[in-house]
Image (spheres, grey):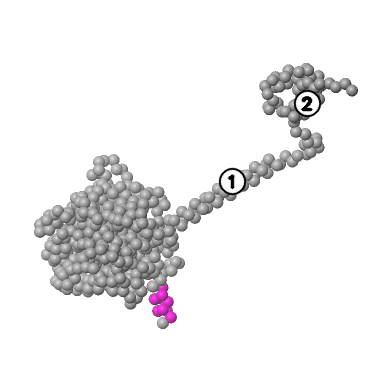
Amino acid sequence: MTTRSFSSPLHRGVSNATTRQSLWQRCPPHFLPDPVKSARRSLPLSIRRISTSSQTAPKVSSWSSSHTPRTTPVRSSLLSNLRITLLTASVALTLTLGWYYVTDTRSGVHRLAPRVLKAVCPDAETSHEVGNAVLKVLWSLGVYPRERGRKGGGEGGEGLGLGVVVWDSLLDNPIAISAGLDKTASIPDALFALGASIVEVGGVTPLPQPGNEKPRVWRVTGEEGMVNRYGLNSLGADDMARQLRRRKIDLGITDNLTGGEEESERDASSVSVEVKNPGSLQEGKLLAINIAKNAKTDNDDTDAVIEDYVTCVNKLGPYADILVVNVSSPNTRGLRGLQTSKPLTRILNAVTTAASSIQSHKPKVIVKISPDEDSPEQIRGVCEAVVATSVDGVVVSNTTKSRPPPSALPSSSSSTILPQPGTEILRSATDARALAQEGGYSGPAMFPKTLELVEKYREALDEATVNGRRKKSGGGKRKVIFASGGIDDGKKVLQVLEAGASVAMMYTTLTYQGVGAVGRVKEEVRGELEAWREGRTEG
């Protein structure tokens, strides 16, 4: 048998198409070295077609190709669109429910916020400033916490209402937020959204002043109390007036503001006559502004002191439903000396005169008194001054210089960290150091004193009013009392109302229990009233 040596078909010119096909099947063109590719391109066109066809996938039969359903792409597209729609709807629903939950003051997340702030900002004043800044941003974005559910008002389908009449205004409820939480009037609407019917901003002084040196605020965590010696730090009356004027513009209350700042401010206040409550700009709510004198003003110069208060009235009166005359801050040296009858009468007379001269409306005037000047003579002197000058009411009271003992903590407090009824607590070293600081104390331990003072002032005011009518030296309508100090649950609200107050004010409780505190207290008031009504019906 003759043997033939093998040589590559590429070297022999390759006349056999099958051999070439076999070679290309084993080594596809894109893996061949360049010389092989060149050889392939030199082949006749017919052979290259055979080669190409041999590498393609086998074709399906003509029957299966002609009978492939044409609806498959359409069905696939519909399913894809359905999945996208369901995914979009799920995301939208999740975001909506999340927004609804986070912006509801009843949400548990708001109870955690004060603890987070405390952990992030150990300094109480810094924590306060950060909290206000966050609330301001949330308000501007429309994702601020707000009260939902039963908000108060009159009797209706939602059950027992909480509406109260204060002076000639029907308020949604008897709960107010005290001054100090919003010192610059930068977030009054955000505070109204929490459910309070009255928000007090300030205190504010005629000229800017820094207040006392820092640190000047201390938490008394064991009893949810606080000690502060702010010293009425203020940006001044002009700054607050600009804030409140801008608020009216942002809410669309004013228009045609084409002049300078003074003309714009005059226009902003002049439209107040068209609004039911020109300070709050809301039905069933009132805005109070706490005014005080500058620390540098000589307390013995009564004329200079009067000028400070009147300046605040002239600049801020057009934006207020209530003007609160502060003569009781414990952190401004000598200020409480103005609470004696003679200087107080002169100050209140000047303030009421200035308030009555405001063209757009006449704001109510009330005076904020000290809890430490509580002798019968001192209380009687304040009440006689109030009646003689036609002041509309009294805030009872400000922070106290005294330090209540642990046994003074009220057993009815809603706090989860306060002691059980009939027990005392041992204050921690941190709380003891805070209580040793100079300044005004606030917290639940103040409530017994607040309740006692409300009863005393109610009696003294009524007596002074009757005497004033008899002597024709004053009188008028019954004076209103705002109770402030240690109020942190619904039972305490009802206690001060029964003692003669018309409004119960809160502040320190919000710093510990968060923005949901107002709504919770209102629900507790409603629950107490409903229980009383059911018991009366059964009886």
Total label count?
Answer: 2
Q: Few, some or many C-alpha atoms within 10 Å of disc 1 (few <14, some 14-19, many ≥20)? A: few
Q: Quadrant of the N terminus?
A: top right
Q: Position of residue 319 (x, y in %)?
A: 27, 53
Can you identify the residue that label 1 sits on?
84
- Rendered image quadrant of residue 118: bottom left
Give the residue displayed 34% in from the left and 76% down from the top: 421
Q: Which residue is mark 2?
A: 21
The residue shown at (33%, 52%) is 130
Instruction: Say which residue appears at 22% left-offset and 59% top-offset.
Output: 229
| Secondary element type, mark 2 | helix
- Please give left or right for residue 12 compared with residue 301 in the image: right
Residue 135 horizontal side relative to residue 235, left or right: right
Q: Please say if 239 is above or below 194.
A: above
Q: Furthest residue to the bottom? A: 539
Q: Magenta-highlighted stretch: main secondary structure?
A: helix
| Relative depth, front residue between 234 and 4 | 4
Front in this rendered view, residue 435 or 359:
435
* Mark 1 and mark 2: Cα distance apart in space: 49 Å
Amino acid beneath label 2: Gln
Label 2 neighbour load within 10 Å: few <14, some 14-19, many 20+:
some
Q: Earlier in the sequence, mark 1 or mark 2?
A: 2
The answer to whether residue 404 is left or right of residue 411 is left
Tell me where the magenta segment starts and ends, as one range.
Answer: 529-538
Q: Position of residue 429 (x, y in %)?
A: 28, 65
Residue at point 29%, 50% (across, down):
244
